[in-house]
């Protein structure tokens, strides 16, 4: 099964994106597989339960790989892929060992994965930093890559998309609001192309 890694800095909305994209595809519940560097286990949640438990304002809410299987309508049936939410990255060395290890796990996945959705906070359109540039650079080595400019509901500037297209000139940039599930049609097109 094809795997798509959801990657980006901490608190940009990776987990809400993952869960609400599943909701957009018509799923009402998800089986989440939690994988840290030692163990792996799976548990089922309604999407609302998962949002309540795993989406938060605080940094590093996600501390391991959390993957779900997406089912996309395909002809008369469906086709599946694995969407892998990951521990958010920070530019500095994090003081907490467990979070450093979890970020190491994200970076290992970045080096192995073929399909990558790089989530950024769209409100930061004027200040793309080195970490996001480096992730975009990794994106040039994978089979498919797109920048998801999230939190677009909070973006005020009419130049925001232009700024992002300048910062990521060779990449596909998709503005979305994971909160309102807007912009997800283009994400679905990206995912269908991966399949
Ligand atoms: N307004 C708005 N808020 C959002 C959106 N997406 C996420 N958020 C909020 O941003 C915060 C972080 O969301 P998460 O999905 O937990 O972010 P994350 O990238 O998974 O964070 P970590 O796992 O902690 O690295 C939460 O308070 C979300 O409700 C969006 O599209 N619009
Ligand atoms: Mg998260």
Image (tube, rainbow, N blue to C red):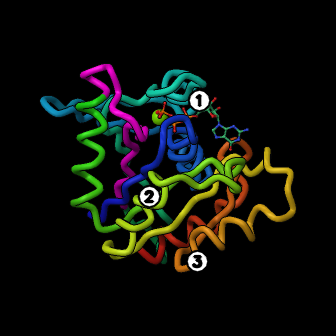
The answer to whether marks 1 and 3 mark residues whose Cβ atoms lie closer than 8 Å is no
Which span is picked out in magenta? 81-99
Tell which tag, 2 or 3, sits nearer the viewer: 3
Q: Residues within 10 Å of mark 2 (few under 14, many from 20)?
A: some
Which quadrant: the N terminus? bottom left
Residue denoted by label 2: 71
Q: Residues within 10 Å of mark 3 (few under 14, many from 20)?
A: few
Distance from label 2 to label 3 (Cα)? 31 Å
Closer-to-camera residue (13/94): 94
Q: Tag on residue 77?
A: none
The answer to whether marks 2 and 3 mark residues whose Cβ atoms lie closer than 8 Å is no
Is residue 20 toward the left or the right of residue 61 in the image?
Answer: right
Residue denoted by label 1: 48
Query: Measured from the top left, where is residue 149 in percent x and y?
Result: 63, 56
Counting residues from the start of the chain, the first of labels 2 and 1 encountered is 1
Is residue 141 toward the left or the right of residue 26 in the image?
Answer: left
Q: Is residue 69 magenta?
A: no
Residue at the spot x=54%, y=29% of the render? Answer: 55
Residue at the spot x=40%, y=62% of the render? Answer: 116
Q: Quick check: can you spot residue 195?
A: no
> Is disc 2 placed on a helix, strand or loop?
strand
Closer-to-camera residue (26/190): 190
Residue denoted by label 3: 169
Residue at the spot x=51%, y=43% of the render? Answer: 14
Query: Measured from the top left, where is residue 88 in percent x and y?
Result: 42, 38
């Amino acid at each position: 099964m094809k795997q798509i890694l959801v990657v980006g800095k901490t608190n940009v909305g990776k987990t809400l994106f993952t869960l609400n994209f599943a909701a957009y595809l018509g799923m009402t519940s998800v089986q989440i597989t939690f994988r840290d560097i030692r163990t792996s286990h799976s548990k089922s949640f309604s999407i609302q339960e998962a949002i309540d438990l795993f989406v938060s304002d605080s940094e590093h809410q996600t501390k391991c790989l959390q993957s779900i299987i997406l089912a996309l309508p395909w002809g008369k049936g469906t086709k599946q892929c694995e969407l892998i939410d990951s521990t958010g990255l920070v530019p500095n060395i994090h003081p907490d060992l467990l979070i450093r290890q979890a970020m190491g796990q994200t970076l290992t996945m970045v080096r192995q994965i073929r399909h990558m959705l790089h989530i950024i906070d769209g409100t930061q359109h004027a200040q793309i930093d080195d970490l996001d540039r480096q992730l975009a650079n990794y994106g040039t080595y994978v089979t498919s890559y797109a920048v998801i400019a999230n939190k677009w509901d909070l973006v005020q500037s009419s130049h925001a998309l232009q700024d992002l297209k300048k910062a990521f000139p060779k990449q596909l940039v998709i503005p979305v609001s994971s909160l309102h599930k807007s912009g997800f049609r283009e994400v679905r097109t990206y995912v269908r192309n991966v399949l």
